[in-house]
Amino acid sequence: MHTRTEDGTQSFSHAHFGGNDQPPPPEPPSGEHGSPREHAVISMFDLFSIGIGPSSSHTVGPMRAGTIFVSDLRDSGLLDRVARIKLALYGSLAATGKGHMTPQALLLGLEGADCETVDTASVPVRYEDIVRSKVLTLGKDTPERGEPKQIMFDYERDLKWMWGQTLPMHSNGMRMSVFDKDGDLLATNDFYSIGGGFVVNGAMATANTSGPTAPRELLQDGENPVAPIVEPSPPEVSPTVMDDIPTSHPVDTLENVYYKSVRRQDAPEARREGKSTMEDASVPLLGDSSEPKPAGDEPPYPFHNMDSLLAITRKHNLTIAQVVYENELTWATPEEVNAKIMRIWRVMDEGIRAGVHSTEEVLPGSLKLKRRAPVLYSRLTRGPYIGGKSQGISGDKPRYAIEGKQETAVQPAARRRERQPRVRGSFNHEVIPVPQRRPDFPAMNWLSCWAIATNEQVASGGRIVIAPTLGAAGIIPAVLRYVVEFVAISPEDEENLIMTFLLTAAAIGMLFKRGATISAAEGGCMAEVGTSCSMAAGAFAACMGGSPEVIEQAAETAIEHNLGLTCDPVDGLVQAPCIERNAVGAVKAVVSANLALSYSGTNAISLDEAIHAARLTAADMHTKYKETSLSGLATTVKIPVAVPDC
C-alpha cells in the first residue's frame, strides 16, 4: 500500500508483509520531487550527529523520541499528573526492535538520556533495573528542565509490540500515551524514526483535544478505554495502517525532518520548515549588494538537487565543500563550525581505534560473531598471523589507528614465508601441498579493517558518529581515515582534507535525504550503505582534487551499483551482513571515485537521475527487505541453538 502525505511527497513504507505489492502511484518527472523553494539544506551536524549503536533508526531515534515526549509533557504542564505510560512499537520497530535495543533506548530516552553523552556501559544496567524494579523516572537525567516524575512501569504490560501494523507516514512508528491516576488519558503522540536519528514529531494531543486512537492492546482489563478500539490484523497478513484524521492529529510532515533539536522553538525556523528562496537569492562570493540576501536564518546558498548545487558552484566560483561551509555559518561562527567538524572526526577516529584494539572476542547477540578488526589490524601492522614474527617493528609500542604513518607494513616476501600451506591438485595427479597465494591489496585491506572496526563498535552499542546512519557508519570513517593516512602531506593539509571530505559528503547526503531516503525501513540497505557509499565516493574525489562535476560522477557511480540492495539482518541484529557490507562499501566508494577521476567525458547518468532511481526502487521494494528480517538472509541463515547436556 502506498500513500501520499499532505505535502504531496510519497510515503512508501507501507508495502505488504505478504502477497503482492500494489503498484506505486505515478511518480513526478525526475528532478521534480518537490518545489524548488523547498531546499535540501540541513545542518551537516544534524546529518553527522553522535549516537550509540546498534541502530540510528531503531536505537537513537527511539531514545530521542522518548526525550521529546517528556519535554512536551513538561511544556504542557502535564508531567506532574502522569501516573502510567503506554508505549507501542509498529512496523519495522516491532519486527526487529529487540535485536536493535529499541526498548532499552526508548526507556532511557524517557528518563532523559542523551545519546551523545550517556555512558554506553550503563545502558543495559539501567534498562535491567527499570524492568526489575518496575519503576520509570520520567525526565530523570534532565532535572534542570523541571522536576522528574517517578511512575510505575510494567514492561510486559506497558510496552506493546504491534506486529503486523504500521502507523501512517512511516514504518518506524511509535505511539506514546500517558494516563493519570484514575486511568484517564492525559496526552498521546505518534513519533516516526525516519533514519539517521531524525524523528518526526506529530503534534501531541491532550485530553481536551482529539488525537490518535489507541488500540485495545495498549489497555488492560479494568483500565479506562479512552479511545475507539482498532482491532489488529494477524502478523501473517498485510499490515494494517492505523487511520488518523488530519484534523484530530495534525502531524506536520516536515516537522523534525530537518533538525534534531528536542524542542521545536529551539530550532531555527528555516530548518524547521525546509523552505527557502530560489537560488537567485544566493549571496555572491564577493558580496555584491545588487543581489538580494536571504533574511533571518536562511542559508545563503540553498540547493534542492545536484543540478542546482552545481549551478551555485559555477555562479559563485565555489567548491561544494565551500557551499556547505558558508551555509553552516548561518547557524554558527567559523570557530564553532571548525571545532564541530574536528570533533566529528575525532569521534570517528576513536571508533576505529576502539574497534581495532577491542579485547572483546565475541559480539553481543545470538549470532555469537567473533570480532575480526583486531585480527585484521594485527596482520596489517605486525604480520600476517597473530603470534607471527613482527617485521620492521621493535619493542612493545602501542599501536593506534591514528599512528599508522609510523607503522611499517610487513613485506610481501616475508608474508609468503610465514603463510600456512593449503592443498590443491588436478584430476590427473596426486594432491600436493602448495603455498597459499593471497595477493596484497594494501588499500583494500586498510579500508576493510577500519570499516569493520567501526561497525563492530556499532554492533556492541558503542558511541559512533551517525554517517548518515549507524548501519552504514563504517564507510565514511574508513575512507576518511585512508585520506588522512595516505593522502595528507602535513598537519595543515590533514585538517583541510578532513573538512573538505566531511563538508562534501554532507552535501551529497542532503540530496539523498530530500530526494530519496536514508532509512532502511523505507529503502532497504540501498538507503543506508548505498547513500553512505555515494557520500564517501564524492568526498574522496573532492580530496583528490576532483571538480564538482567529477564529484557528482563519483557519487553517482557509487549509488548506481547499490540500487536494490536489501536490508535483511539475520536475527534482527546489525551484524550479518551489515558489518562486512560496510567494508565492501568503503572499497566500492574509492573505486567509484577513481573511475570518475580517470574519466574525462560526460557521465551518461546524472546523480539526480540516480537518486530518483533510488526513490523508485525503494517504492517498489517489498517490505520483507526493509529491515523487517522477514526474508532473504534473515530467513535462510540458520542460527544454532545451544542445547544443555542432560
Image (cartoon, rainbow, N blue to C red):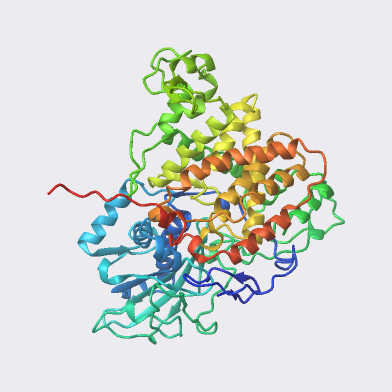
Q: Nearer the viewer, residue 410 or 281?
A: 410
For the point 83% across and 42% down, the residue is 601
In this rendering, the answer to whether 304 lies above or below 588 is below
**Residue 551 position in % (x across, y down):** 72, 43
For the point 32% across and 74% down, the residue is 82
For the point 41% across and 57% down, the residue is 635
Q: Nearer the viewer, residue 59 or 261?
A: 59
Q: Residue furthest right?
A: 290
In this rendering, the answer to whether 87 lies above or below 596 is below
Q: Quadrant of residue 302?
A: bottom right
Q: Quadrant of residue 185?
A: bottom left
In this rendering, the answer to whether 194 lies above or below 606 is below
Residue 175 located left or right of residue 590: left
Residue 383 seen in render? no
**Residue 476 position in % (x across, y down):** 57, 42
Residue 16 located left or right of residue 26: left
